[in-house]
Amino acid sequence: MTLIPHPPQRALPLHREMERVWSRPPGLKGFLTSVNHSEIGLRFMALAGIYFGIGGILAMLIRTQLATPQGAFLDTALYNQIFTMHGSIMMFLFAIPMLEGLSMYLLPKMLGTRDMAFPRLSAFGWWCYLFGGLILLVALAAGMAPDGGWFMYTPLSSRTYTPGVNADVWLLGVTFVEISAIAAAVEITVTILRLRAPGMRLTQMPLFAWYMLGTSAMMLAGFPPLILGSVLLELERAFDWPFFDVARGGDSLLWQHLFWLFGHPEVYIIFLPAAGAISTILPVMCRTRILGYEAIVAAIVGLVFLSFGLWVHHMFTVGIPQMALAFFSAASTLVAVPTAVQIFAWTGTMWKGTPRLSLPMLHLLAFFATFVLGGLTGVMLAVVPFNWQAHDTAFVTAHLHYVLIGGFVFPMMAAAVYWLPLMSGRVRVRGVGEVAFALIFIGFHGTFLIMHLTGLLGMPRRIPVYPDNPEWALPNLISTLFSFMMSIGFVLFALDLLLHALFGRRSTRDPWQANTLEWKMALPVPSYNIAALPVSTDITAVSLARGEGALPGAPRGRREVLAVSSLDGKAQHVAVLPGNTLLPVVTAAMVGVFVLLMLFGAYILACTAMLGVLVCGWTWHRFGRDLRPARIEITPGQTLPDQTGVEGSLTRSGMIALIIADASLFGSFLFALGFLSVIAPGWPPPDSGLGLGALLLGGVALGALAVASGLARWSRGPLPGALAGVLALVAVLGVALLLDDPTRHARDALRAAATGYAALHIGIGVLLALIARTRAPATAAASRSIWRLWQDFTLITVAILTLLVVAQEVLS
Amino acid sequence: MLAGCDGALSTLAPRGPEAEAIATLWWIMLAGSMAISLMMFALLGLAFRKNRRPLSDRFWTHGMGLGFSFTILSVLLAAAIITGDRLIARHQSASVRVEAIASQWQWRFVQPGPDGAPVETQGRLYIPAGVPVEVFIRSEDVIHSFWVPTLAGKLDAIPGHENRLRFEASEPGVYQGRSAEFSGVGYADMLFEVLAYPPDDVPAQFTNRGESAPAAQAGEPDE
């Protein structure tokens, strides 16, 4: 199907028409209600920048303390809080939100559409991020910040050894931010797969979109293990359910596995978007096209899979059999191959083109210099015997800063300088940025190169003083001095951004002669991005502004985009997106209240806050309820239905992405169950009191769920389906009453957690059935299909859990 | 350069075969890494040269990206696994067995005493020099890590689990050790030492860290 673009209209009236529909009210009201991807993306990046500054100040405190062997600058308890918060802030409040912000800002523009697939979800994610971060910051200011190191190893972080709220702050605050990350991953996935310009095949996407697709897939699969770990640890701390207590069938190593199952993919989750920025910027800086598109896509796919096979390389010193060590060592070394493919593709791109030394290119060269070294020390650390020496020393600190600053911060600075004209419509003021770059580059290598030696000389991470080791004094002093240089560089970088915003000249369109889609927009980019969706590659900024494409303007007074098929980009239906609303901020505030109540141990009250979340969730679905099915002319002579009658709605795609994340959570739970039963010393557990009654109730629940799944396939199914769900819920609550005391043994705690998981899923299934029920039959296809997906997933997981419990009982 | 590598906790001043094997591995990897870095930087620098000969796409993605990196990594991996295998399996039948018990924030050791009966000490582990020793590592509270950098790599002390580390001190002497896993406010001071005595000259009395060792002690090559 070739689409013929609409004939040109006058650009200015078109612009006004679109602004009326897509912009937000001015002032605070607009700030609270905006769901626009450009604004939310910028807010993500701005807030991440602020957290980077705070994390940086903490880093300077650490370096000041370590400048001399007997540093008396901070007491040890405070020092522990500071390094824990430095790591946690940089990982969870800077890196992840920064990449989310960048992709939210860029993806719709690069893919040729007008917003993300779930605009309210973007806003909800940002508010969660703001509130979760604030909880951590307030705790830091109050001296109650987490102090167990950013990976929070149990049992140090358990109630016995961290009695205060410090660890709870981490678990709840970080989980809050993780919710925001899952939300972002869901909508990044759906946006890339379903909201491209009509006709853009997956294989024609800009590389940045490929990188973000890989990233979001990893986020969907990689974050749930940490969420599970945090939930289990919080359950242990709050209710004494012994998942990690070795005396009662738990195992502290379970935490390490769950944490690094998240933690290693995390490294690539951070690196891939940066690599996407490099693959976009580098060819432009070299006036050529990227070399080896296919090879790079293959490398991305390879990284996504390999990165889940090497978490154990963070645990080489916990005492693991040699066979397993060899396997994980091999995986950890092999992961360097796809990285090398990209590095050489970029080098080849530079050879092919004519590189110019403008500021983004300087940052990219700094990336190469830094990341190559960090990659090589990474390979060294994958070598098990060497790891036994270097693990937990300053060598690892140096390595991870080479990888993260080299592989993320330098590319992000290149991206900032490169895409600023798009955000502000201005050109940079020359001079300051170059000085900032030089200070950061020299300061960074001055700080961290010598730190490798410090580590090999035996200095562990996380110690505040070293009176017995005068040989570490000089290298530490050097690191500290250069770290201040680097800090000044970052301040200048911020100043450069400020000067740019205040005094930059107006930029011409496409200042870098980039020729990619995001530069085909007016500068600064308007709220709606483009007046018409591009239907061919032969377009110009002017033709788009005149509406020469698909779906020009906003003649129906609503926010419309085109949903396409995920592989070949065939236009499928017109998706109507929600506009400005208070719902995201209110929902996030409800979740925030819930988290705070949990933090202060008011568990009953916290349940009532959960009700608030539920009410918000219910309100959430009401958007689009009043739409009536209609066919809309997208290009002359070509009409498509809108989303109302279509089963394959964007929301359905979102539900599939969410279920993938949920399946990863469930898989992590099964891993925890298997790990504890096989590895933990305190097994087999005492005899359980579960008998025929529980079996019967479990059978009733399963039967009711099977019936609900069947009803979900019938157009009149929602009401009886909801009733079947309620019956299943009652049966599961009955099982809950029969369970053994969860504080007795990890097995009983796991069963209680599994029961909670089942109840939550059944409850959500009932809600989804009721939502499907409220829709008119003609428009209910999508909601029923979403409910069916959920109901089937619930049936499968509850069946697996039931079978496992039965197997445990039979085998014991 | 090597003088700058000395230090009581330096991994680059090995005093036993295990630490030596790892240090050797490090120097080889360092040389290899420097060569690879220089090559990369040269390739990047040459991109700025005028009139360079264009190379095919496949040279970069397949030749360098896959072929070159795969070759280097395979060699390294083989070396790593062989070294690791040797370090783990070398002393399957270590004759001397000692226990290291970690708790916040100290180390206790149980070792065969002067008369062969087990003796418990605090902060100082007594082992004979020149013979393989096996340390059984346990924790009584949180996770710690047993580390004597000049003798061997570290191994964690994990509640509920027992880990075994095998190593050997080539010469008699005092070797510094410390915990290498963050364990709370007392972490920095969680130090210990390993005293290796000549096998035929067992000290008359085993003392704790901080107390002076009996005069019969051999010289301390570290100092």
Image (tube, coloured by chain):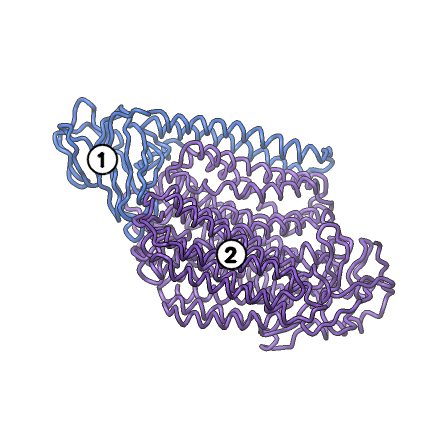
Chain colours: A purple, B blue
Q: Residue furthest top?
A: B200
Tally the marks: 2
- In the rendered view, tell whether residue A338 sits above or below residue A212: above
Q: Amino acid at mark 2?
A: Leu
| Image side of residue A373 versus residue B143, left or right | right
Q: Which mark is residue B125?
A: 1
Estimate the x, y position of residue A645 in percent, counting from the top left. Answer: 73, 65
Q: Quadrant of residue B86?
A: top left
Estimate the x, y position of residue B46 in percent, counting from the top left. Answer: 66, 36
The structure residue drawn at horizontal position 61% and vertical position 74%, both measured from the top left corner, is: A581
Q: Which residue is mark 2?
A: A702
Q: Decide: few, some or many residues near mark 1? Use Cα within 10 Å; few <14, some 14-19, many ≥20.
A: many
Quadrant containing the C terminus of chain A is: top left
Q: Closest to the observer: B5 or A720?
A: A720
Give the structural element (helix, strand or loop) at label 2.
helix
The structure residue drawn at horizontal position 43% and vertical position 53%, both measured from the top left corner, is: A229
Estimate the x, y position of residue A319 in percent, counting from the top left. Answer: 37, 37
Q: Amino acid at mark 1?
A: Leu
Estimate the x, y position of residue A644 in percent, counting from the top left. Answer: 72, 67
